[in-house]
Structure formats: structure tokens, C-alpha cells
Amino acid sequence: MDMVFVFEKILNMSIVSSYCIGAVILLRFILRRQPKIFSYLLWSVVLFRLLCPVTLSSPYSLLWIDTELFSRERIAEGWKSEAETADWQGADLSTVDMVRETAGISGDTEKDSYGSAMAVSEADPFMAGRINGLFRAAAWIWLIGTILFTFYGIAAAVRIHFFLKRVSPVPVKECRNVYEAEEIPTPFVFGIVRPKIYISANLSEKARGYVLGHERVHIARLDHLVKIAAWTARCLHWFNPLVWLAFAWMENDMEMSCDEAVIRKFGMDARQEYSCALLSLSCEKAGTVGSPLAFGEGQVKSRILNVLTYRRKTYTAVLAAIFLLILAVSGLSLNPMGASGRQEGGEALAFATAYANYFVGRDGNGLVDLYLDEETAFDHVILLEKDNGVYTFGYSSPWPDEFRLTVDEEAQKAVLRYYAWSSDPHVTVWKEEMFFEKTQDGYRVTDSQLRQFDEISTMEEFEEAYWVFDAYQFTDYVERGYVEAINDQTVYDREAKIEQDRNAVYRSPRTAAAWILNLAGGESVVHIDSDGKAVVKYTFSDGDSVTIPMYNANYTSETGNTAYQYGQHAEYGDVWIVDLASWSAKAS
């Protein structure tokens, strides 16, 4: 199983558990005058949420948060100001905000003719890959921390085991599973399948009765297993301080409920003597994490106060507490019906955006996770390979860079356009029609078809490749660093005395327009202005034409030529690219 997927699941479980911890703290306060067994049982829902990755859904639930708030498609959260959000005119803003938070994208969004939300990615082309890398690094940090805490707990148990071998406690007559030795500082329970009680040989008869009564309650309730489960939860969620706080309180409630059980057994008159025994046998390091169940661990002061003020509760009060306990535990254990970790109405858009981010980020594991199965993924994802159980998605050009997408949730179809670049540099358009369905595990891809636009010969193909959201969508060569790459290549060729001009295609607006936009089979007419700008009218073979504004990226107004635009190199040469800022409405 993918470690990143496991970490993502643990993180979501930790977030939901934090919500439950807050609810339990509130309910614990409400039940503060009731028997501590109720407070102790409340923590079971936190333990369940921390350890169980699967839960049921129900119309009745007290969870008012997303149970999958954190996922790889949401790690690039793009918190935008209200002013930025206002730019997304004509869009369903609730959906747009969700998509921004989900994929960390920005741009213009509006409704298509089907009423589906659409999004434009203007983020760093490698951002998805970078963030996935950071997420994998975080997963490794989590794994290392979990291993260290686990070994710490095992080492503590081994240390106690060897201590008991050294002191060699002897069985106490007429007391099953009870062993004593003078070197044992405080009574405790140790063991898993057949736990044993270890006590000091110097205990008085009365103190021994209280201690054995207390520890036997622990064993009867399987508290020794609960403590191991709690320690396991802390190892898995060591990064969450609320988890450590919760189990410190849970252990204290565990001990107080045992104290109350002993008082009920021995009678109310035993409270004073029991408190004295508790004080005299209190652990020097009470509540040390990973320690076995010890008679005097926990907050001894609060335990003594609870024992001295303990009173039997009325039948009505106990029934009310039980009713509240059942409502709370069931409500916090069940997910709300229909909740899948995504906002209703935007699930398909979030899914498609995650798919596109994995595609441009070359995250093979992420892509395969979104398909129905591995076979379906390999049938439809180009460049997908598997090496030693890890899915890879190509290492060389062409490299899918930006993307634009539209989603028709009713038809369960997404149309994605990727802008894939090669090291020339050169950009082609890949159009993918992706079909999906909703399963029990969320949306999954059932089919996809990819078409590459590298030779566009008709206006119909041109608009299919570039006409999105009622405007032409092109790659910005300056923003993406392609102009700088062309200039660096020019310098290298000259220093290496390479006679072939590999960048000749960019020296003329005529050839540059056709090359950059992947046009083929047509004719063009060029008008060049004196300020480093030009207009290319390209006529396709079918007679339709498009007007393409161009400008020389190396032109400077100071010299009137291409010199000194990029520092000391004065001979880069002309680099004509599409003038996105001056692009007019589409020509007829």
C-alpha cells in the first residue's frame, strides 16, 4: 500500500479525532458530577476514530466536519482574497472556492452550456510535483516518528520484563496471578494475554486488599489492552498534541473509575484509608507514557479528592448519563449519511481537478488510485509504467505542463486540455476526454481518450485545441521560462560553435506563429511594426483564418533591437512569441 495514502488516511483520522476530542472534553465537563466510568467510556470514541480507518454512515451523526478534509488534491490550497474571488465572475462561487482549496488553482471560471463549473490552472507547472514531493517527505517523517515511538514503547516493556526477571517476584498464596517482591516500588499490572499483578512484599494487609481490588477491576475491564491500544494510537498520531492530552485525561478517568469501583466494593467508610494507601503508593513519575497499569499513577491529588467526595448517584441521574453517553458515542462514531469527504455539487469537479494535477505532476501512484483498477489505468494512461511496485509516469519530454478542464457531472464526463512541452522548447495540446463513475470509495475513472494536436490544419481543430471558456487559451512562453531557455540554447550553440541555428523557427513571426501554435498546411501574411511587434494572419486550408498578434521577446526600446535584454549577452537574436496581452477576439 502506498505510504502517502496511509499518511493521508492517518491525517484525516487525526483531524476527525481532534473534533471528537473537543466534543468529549465538553461532555466530560457536563458529566463531571457523574461516576467517572461515563467519562472514561466517552474516550472510547476517540480511540475508535484514531485506530479504525473505516466507519459506517448514518442519518444521525454529530460530526459536522468533512471526514476527508485533507487529501493530496487539497494540499495546494490557494487561499485567495475576496478581491481575487470576485474575479471569478459568472461562476458558482461555492464550487469555485472548493476547487481552489482542493487543487490550489487560480484563474477564470465560469459556466459552460451544460451549467458545469470550469477551472483554469495558472499555477507553477511543477507545483503539483513539488507538493507531492513535500507530501511524501512529510509521510516519511511521520513514519520515522511512528517507528521511534513504537520502539520506545517496546523498549519500556522489555525493560520491565528484565526488571522482573532480576527481582524474581514470588506468587502470593491464595491470590491468583499475584506476585510480590520487596524491590517492586509500586503495584502494577503487566502482561497481555494473562496479565499478572505485581506488588511490594512490604504492603500492609489493608493496603494489599485495596491494591488488589483496584488492579483486578483493571484486568476485568481489560484496561491493560485499552492502554496498549491508546499507546498504539499515540504512536500513529504522535504529531497531534491533542491526542497526547486526550489520553492523559483518559488514563486519569480510567484510574478514577477504578477507585470508585473499589469504594463501592469496600463501602463508603473505606474512603479515608483508601486515600492514604493511594497517597503512600503514588508513582514518582505518574502517568509516564508507555508504563504498565500502576496503582498510584495519574493525577493522585485529583484522584484522592474524587475518592473523598464520592457519593452514590441517584437512579435517575445514572439513567440520564447513560442516555447521553449512548447518544454521544454513537453520534461521534458514525459519519453523516452521504458524506464522502467532498462538498456536494462539487465532487466531480474536485475529482477531475485532482486527476489533472496528478497528470501534470507525473504522479503515477495518484493516477492509478483514481482509476477503477490497475488494468484500466494501464489501458488508458500513456507513459504509465510500474517499477518495483511503484507507478511512474514518464521521465522525459513531452512533459504535460498546464491544464484547462471542464466537467459535465450529469454525463459523468470531463474534458481536459494539457499543454505538453518538450525541451526544444515546444508546446503541443493534448485533449483528454475522461469518463468517471461514483463508487463506494468515491469517483473513479472508467475510460479516457487522449488526442494530441501537433498538426492543426483547420479552424475547427484550432478552436478545439485552444478555444476554452469563450477565449483562446495559450501557454505564456515568458512566464514558463521558455524564452530564457531559447536564449540559453542560443548562447550554448555559439560558444560550442554549432553552425545549425536550432532556434531559427523563432527568428521570424511567420514561422514562429505556425510553430508555437502547431499550425500546418496553411498560408500566412505578416505585418511587422517598428516597435518589435507583428501581426500574422494565418489562413487554413479550408479557407478560415485567424489573426495572431506576435512580439519579439528580446526587443528593447532603448536600443531598438534585441541587444542587452538578458544581461551581458548582446546577440541572442530575435525570439518571436504570441502576444497574449494583445490577443483579440477570435476572427471569423
Image (tube, rainbow, N blue to C red):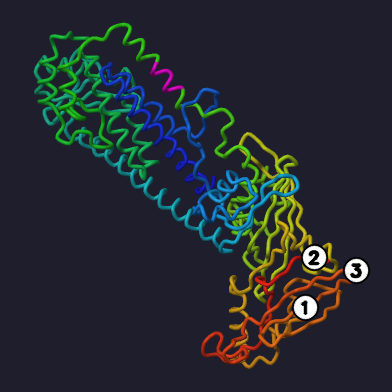
| Residue 399 point in image, percent of width and height | 65, 65
Q: The C terminus appears in which quarter of the rendering?
A: bottom right
Query: In the picture, residue 515 is in which quadrant?
Result: bottom right
- The residue tagged 2 is 462
Label 1: element kind: strand
Whether 293 is drawn above or below 4: the answer is: above
How many C-alpha atoms fall within 10 Å of the one at disc 3: few (<14), some, or many (≥20)?
few
User: Which amino acid, by three-letter code, is at mark 1?
Assistant: Val
User: Which amino acid, by three-letter code, is at mark 2?
Assistant: Phe
The mark nearer the N terminus, 2 or 1, is 2
The label number, if any, that marks residue 295 in the structure image: none
Considering the whole magenta stretch, tell me its main secondary structure. Answer: helix
- The residue tagged 3 is 542
Q: What range of the chain is rendered magenta?
A: 324-330
Q: Nearer the viewer, residue 86 or 27?
A: 86
* Residue at x-position 52% and y-position 32%: 54
How many C-alpha atoms fall within 10 Å of the one at disc 1: few (<14), some, or many (≥20)?
many
- The residue tagged 1 is 536
| Residue 197 point in image, percent of width and height | 23, 23
The mark nearer the N terminus, 3 or 2, is 2
Left or right of 204: which side holds 123? right
